[in-house]
Image (cartoon, grey):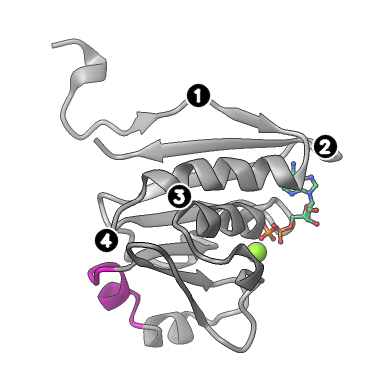
Amino acid sequence: MAPDLQVGRPQVTPMLETTSETETSQAGEALGRELVAGDVVLLYGDLGAGKTAFVRGMARGVGANPDEVSSPTFTLVQEYTGASATLYHVDLYRLEPAEIGDLGLEDLVSGDGIVAIEWAERWSGRPDDAIDVRIEDAGEDQRRIRIERPR
Ligand code: ADP
Ligand code: MG
């Protein structure tokens, strides 16, 4: 069997390069259009990488209002109503491990919404079938985005 056909091997999309926040949102929108209820998107990348910008695009892609997307502050889990599913947006950046435990992410990701989690490395419960989005700052307005989907 060819190595790239092995069961369980993550499928890696080519790296995208964006040069503006708008382009990063457009990448999120493209992903959002493909998502279905139950999908989980985990976002990794430093502060200012563009995770929230990507989620804003995802909101548009699922048919929700992108203007509602901001960095979650007091509301730990933001909900945006989409065309066929609700998008739940979580940012683990400022949370202590105990607070992350209290969020009930296991229930959220096994529900029938679409879930996007920023700073997902802070959560130990990563589902095997999650879609991973890694965003790297490549200087000035350049960002590198890699999207890994399970097969
Ligand atoms: P994060 O959620 O990863 O902390 P944000 O999406 O909140 O990041 O912020 C990204 C910041 O970087 C914004 O100020 C945005 O204008 C800026 N930026 C510059 N170039 C890009 C780009 N190519 N993609 C995304 N954001 C960019
Ligand atoms: Mg953010």
Q: Which residue does the image show at 41% across and 54% down from the upper left?
A: 41
The nearer-to-camera label among 3 and 1 is 3
Q: Is residue 13 left or right of residue 46?
A: left
Amino acid identity at mark 4? Gly
* Residue position for label 3: 32
Are the two marked residues, 2 and 1, in contact with CB atoms closer than 8 angstroms?
A: no
Q: Is residue 125 above or below residue 79?
A: above
Residue situated in front as seen by the camera: 84 or 144: 84
Query: What label sits on residue 103 in the rendered view?
Result: none
Give the residue pinned by disc 4: 38
Q: Residue at x 44, y 86 (%)?
A: 98
Distance from disc 1 to disc 4, alpha carbons, whole Å, reads 24 Å
Magenta residues span: 104-112
Horizontal and vertical percent position of residue 74:
62, 89
What amino acid is found at the position of numbered circle 2 in the picture?
Gly
Q: Helix, strand or loop at disc 4?
A: loop
